[in-house]
Image: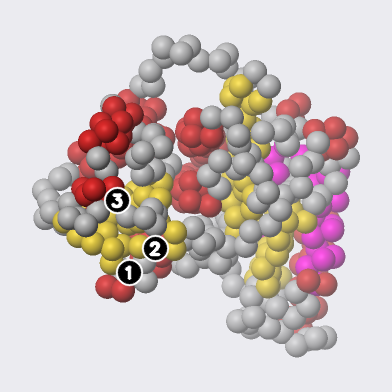
Amino acid sequence: MKSLNFFIVLLSSLSLATITKSQDPSFLYNSCSNDTTYTRNSTYQANLNLLLSSLVSNATRNNLDGFYNSSIGLDPDDVYGLFLCRGDVNKNACQNCVALAAKEAIQRCPVEKVVILWYDLCLLRCSNRAFFATMDQDPGEFLFKSDQNIADEPERFNRLVATTMNDTVTQATIATSGGKKFAVEEVYFTKSLNLYSLAQCTPDLSSSDCNRCLRIAISILPSCCSQKPGASILYPSCNVRYETFKFYNITTVAAKPPPPPPSPLTRPKDGDEISTVESLQFDLSSIEAATNNFSPDNKLGEGGFGEVYKGTLPHGQQIAVKRLSKYSGQGAAEFKNEVVLIAKLQHRNLVRLLGYCLQGAEKILIYEFVPNKSLDHFLFDPGKQGLLDWSIRYKIIGGIA
């Protein structure tokens, strides 16, 4: 996977009334690559203008379902473009969003050939290369409400986000209604709060590429957006979003009704647990980038299980990376089972598991970084043993048990 440049912004909380009444597009982010540019008043610009006009015109057609791609011109002045409207918006809202995006594309990216504009209601993309039916994750952006956190049972909220997004991605991947690869879901969290989720791919992707794009997107959520009441991951080929308010038009999509609150005695099935853990998977390249390719300068220690490195994620969060020995003999199934167990252990005296990586021979666990070192540093250091008398040790053991 290519390296991603992420940008954090404050998402505005649009009310349901605003969304369903006017469905005015809100700008989210744009990418203008400086790698390739064109000359003003050139043949390429003329072809680009024709393509943008074609996209706007085709956004008004009744036989389209919120998606259209086309190309104009011959090499070296050929231009490729598409638009994708969110699966729940009506034709007028789609047309307005595409028209606005086409207008702003020239203003925001005046000479760049590779252009992507994201709005809450649509995506517009242009390039000098053919990209249709190709899964792209570069550039990628994540957005969340930086000044807010879930106060009520944040860890349970994180688990609900993981399982719900996993299910929504599955539904979007297999969705065939009208050719859309789009799904939404509403689930119960508390008496006063539900969780709303959305996943969508461009319809020209294969089901396998759509699934891969969305799975990579939701794997970012635990590291970027833990305990946040809303977040979005934007890629050129797919996007995911969740909120604690109803941000999509429920009347135009076949959303599942929220289930009743679970019984306190209900235990999750093994399959559900594994699905939750699957959504915590990190890509190896992102771990290598965070640790500077497992640099010795970032090494915190090592033991019989392997080595531990300090790392920093793109948004600044520090992590501890346990790189397990390649010769441990532990298989993939056993490793996943162990991750399931660790993920369920949530306690203030235990370091929190953020995710894992299982790629090739690599088996890696990603934890929150603890700056004051671990318990064994105090237990086995002759100079620090006295800081933990047996009364304190007993309380720690009892609390964890």
**Crowding at mark 3 (Cα within 10 Å: few <14, some 14-19, many 20+):** few
Disc 2, SS: strand
Task: Identify residue type, mark 2.
Answer: Gly
Residue that appears at 64% across and 80% down: 34
User: Disc 1 designates what residue?
Assistant: 298
Q: Quadrant of the C terminus?
A: top left
Q: Indicate the position of residue 185 as horizontal and vertical percent values.
A: 60, 29
Q: Is residue 307 above or below residue 374?
A: below
Give the extent of the magenta segment.
81-106
Disc 3, SS: loop
User: Disc 2 designates what residue?
Assistant: 311
User: Disc 3 designates what residue?
Assistant: 374
Q: Where is residue 287, by image quadrant? A: bottom left
Residue that appears at 76% across and 32% down: 249
Mark 2 vs 1, N-terminal side: 1
Q: Indicate the position of residue 191 as horizontal and vertical percent values.
A: 65, 18
Prevalent SS, magenta region: helix
101 is within the stretch colored magenta: yes
Mark 1 vs 3, N-terminal side: 1
